[in-house]
Image (spheres, rainbow, N blue to C red):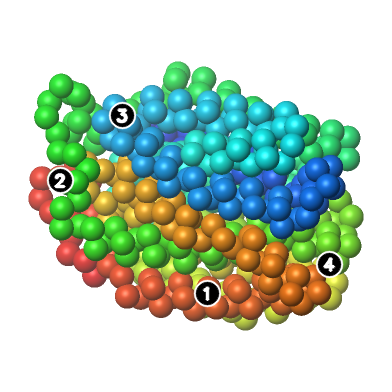
């Protein structure tokens, strides 16, 4: 089933849920990625090194598991919709607060708090969408939802291209308050998850806690954290310092950096949509493994293209594969999760993997410095190793394609 045909088969209510969940992750990622464009400028203003500013990315990633757990538990108890609205307001306000930071220390604290709010959005939005659509649409919608991340990065690139030279890095952060307006749309148009309503609608009824629900499933949780560590190394290792590489090593101007970043995200969106839909046909694991391994031949062009045109081709093709693999993640994790903790487990595993992968930006900065500022070698070596790791970890894990949500009977046997 094609992408457009699948969306046409959804009813109006389902399309509004999907749109809101996609936009929530888009705006969350937009707020995160605004920072990666301005690391050198922040370092210059606060008179510190790039490595010190890049540590803010580590803090944001490291705090996301806490947000995934806190907001996920609230969403499992009180509903996906109201908690999602609170979370969106929080990350938008904290993004705007970054613009007022008088020192690097204050900026680091604000970015850590932003990480908590950012960590909550993905799990809630993904569970709300996956529980609101028919199983046959999950792969296509999974690819769409996850590429909200690339769409947010793309929006950040456009803001950098059009506005940075006029408003500076503080103005970029101030724009980050705009996602709060999404709450108005959710409040008016987005219904609660039907699975949550049927199984958890009455908060007065006793319900199993996290420990009871997860009994016998902690091995699965540990596996998912390792899997998501590999995924996050794959994405953050190929994206977060790419603008810094273009500016510091290749000495490209604002316009060139912005257009290459936009090209990067166009490739990511294509990959996520294609592999997410394809996973309905060939399986979740096979789609992920294929995308991860196909990334390997794209790495030389991505890091050593030698011209803007060849770099653009390389960055487009690499991100087709990186975010192609990622396009399967929302449906894969939600299908493996029990109903009672679907807003908690996928997001907590995702962000737990982020915690383990949070060293990637400082590590790559250090690695490049050891080779005289050679970001190309550092990133190329790193991504090649991570692509193989992701393929292996995925192959060793379970799959529950087509699992029934909200059913009394157990999910299909793991493939």
**Residue 126, placed above or below residue 273:** above
For the question of whether residue 324 can be seen, the reply is no
- Residue that badge 4 annotates: 249
- Residue 198 numbered mark, or none: none
- Whether tag 4 and tag 3 are in contact, CB under 8 A, the answer is no
* Mark 1 crowdedness (10 Å alpha carbons): few <14, some 14-19, many ≥20: many
Measured as percent of width and height from the top left, residue 4 is found at: 49, 48
Q: Secondary structure at mark 4?
A: loop
At a point 72% along the width and 32% down the height, the residue shown is 101
- Whether tag 3 and tag 2 are in contact, CB under 8 A, the answer is no
- Residue that badge 3 annotates: 79
- Whether tag 2 and tag 4 are in contact, CB under 8 A, the answer is no
* Mark 2 crowdedness (10 Å alpha carbons): few <14, some 14-19, many ≥20: few
Q: Quadrant of the image for the N terminus?
A: bottom left
Q: Secondary structure at mark 3?
A: loop
Measured as percent of width and height from the top left, residue 288 is found at: 44, 68
Q: Secondary structure at mark 1?
A: helix
């Amino acid at each position: 089933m094609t992408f457009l045909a699948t969306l046409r088969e959804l009813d109006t209510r389902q399309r509004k849920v999907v749109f809101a969940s996609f936009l929530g992750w888009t705006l969350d990622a937009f707020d995160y990625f605004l920072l990666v464009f301005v690391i050198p400028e922040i370092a210059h203003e606060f008179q510190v090194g790039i490595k010190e500013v890049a540590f803010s990315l580590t803090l944001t990633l490291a705090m996301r598991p806490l947000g995934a757990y806190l907001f996920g538990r609230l969403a499992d108890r009180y509903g996906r919709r109201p908690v999602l609205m609170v979370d969106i307001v929080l990350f938008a306000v904290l993004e705007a607060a970054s613009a007022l930071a008088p020192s690097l220390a204050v900026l680091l604290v604000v970015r850590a708090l932003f990480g908590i709010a950012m960590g909550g959005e993905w799990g809630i939005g993904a569970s709300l969408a996956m529980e609101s659509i028919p199983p046959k649409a999950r792969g296509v919608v999974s690819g769409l939802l996850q590429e909200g991340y690339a769409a947010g990065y793309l929006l950040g690139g456009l803001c950098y291209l059009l506005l940075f030279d006029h408003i500076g890095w503080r103005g970029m952060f101030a724009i980050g308050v705009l996602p709060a307006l999404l709450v108005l749309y959710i409040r008016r148009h987005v219904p609660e998850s039907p699975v949550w309503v049927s199984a958890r609608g009455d908060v007065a009824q006793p319900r199993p806690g996290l420990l009871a629900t997860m009994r016998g499933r902690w091995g699965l949780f540990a596996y998912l954290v390792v899997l998501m560590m590999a995924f996050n190394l794959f994405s953050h290792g190929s994206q977060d310092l790419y603008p810094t590489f273009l500016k510091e090593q290749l000495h490209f101007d604002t316009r060139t950096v912005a257009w290459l970043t936009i090209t990067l995200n166009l490739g990511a969106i294509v990959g996520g949509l294609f592999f997410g839909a394809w996973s309905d046909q060939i399986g979740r694991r096979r789609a992920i493994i294929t995308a991860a391994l196909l990334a390997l031949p794209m790495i030389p062009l991505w890091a050593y293209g030698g011209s803007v045109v060849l770099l653009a081709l390389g960055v487009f093709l690499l991100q087709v594969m990186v975010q192609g693999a990622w396009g399967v993640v929302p449906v894969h994790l939600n299908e493996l999760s029990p109903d009672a903790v679907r807003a908690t487990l996928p997001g907590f595993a995702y962000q737990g993997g982020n915690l383990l992968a949070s060293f990637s930006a400082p590590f790559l900065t250090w690695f490049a410095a050891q080779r005289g500022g050679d970001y190309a070698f550092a990133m190329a070596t790193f991504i090649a190793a991570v692509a193989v790791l992701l393929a292996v970890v995925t192959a060793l894990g379970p799959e529950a394609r087509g699992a029934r949500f909200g059913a009394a009977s157990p999910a299909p046997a793991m493939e």
